Amino acid sequence: MKHILFDLKGCPFELLDDEQHIKITLYKAVPETKSELLHLQTHKFEPQGVTGFALLAESHISIHTWPEDGIARCDVFTCGDECEPEKAVEYLAKELGAKSTSVQTYERE
């Protein structure tokens, strides 16, 4: 089992504050990890920010955005030998226009 916590920094405000973009990006990140999507939920905050959660058969992907700071804080937790959570990190960073990414990876028992 792998649990990856990561911050995407330097992202454009418009992408981080767009609930539909966050939802589509999460949806498309799931097959990147070789996981099965069970449920996808997002919520738009006022005046800005979006939280999204993809419930996977193999665990989850979550994202919380702070558009005013250009930051998205995310995690991908997967179990199973076939999953590739690192691919979701790469995909989300690309789709959210991150200028830098800080990553912490944990092996869970």
Image (spheres, grey):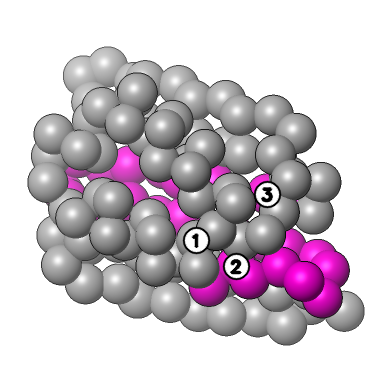
Mark-to-mark CA distance, 2 and 1: 5 Å
CB-based contact (under 8 Å), mark 2 and mark 1? yes
- Per the image, the residue denoted by label 2 is 85
Q: Earlier in the sequence, mark 2 or mark 3?
A: 3
Classify residue 87 as left or right of residue 15: right
Total labels drawn: 3
Q: What amino acid is labelled 2 in the image?
A: Pro
Is 34 included in the stretch rendered in magenta?
A: no
Residue neighbourhood size for the residue with mark 1, other residues' Cα within 10 Å, grouped as few (<14), some (14–19), many (≥20): many
Which mark is nearer the camera, 1 or 3?
1
Q: Position of residue 68 (x, y in %)?
A: 14, 40
Residue 79 vs 13, above or below: the answer is below
| Mark 1 secondary-structure assignment | helix
Residue 85 vs 43, above or below: the answer is below
- Labelled disc at residue 88: 1
- Per the image, the residue denoted by label 3 is 60
Q: Residue sitting at 53 percent across and 73 percent down?
A: 86
- Residue range corresponding to the magenta coloring: 59-86
Residue neighbourhood size for the residue with mark 3, other residues' Cα within 10 Å, grouped as few (<14), some (14–19), many (≥20): many
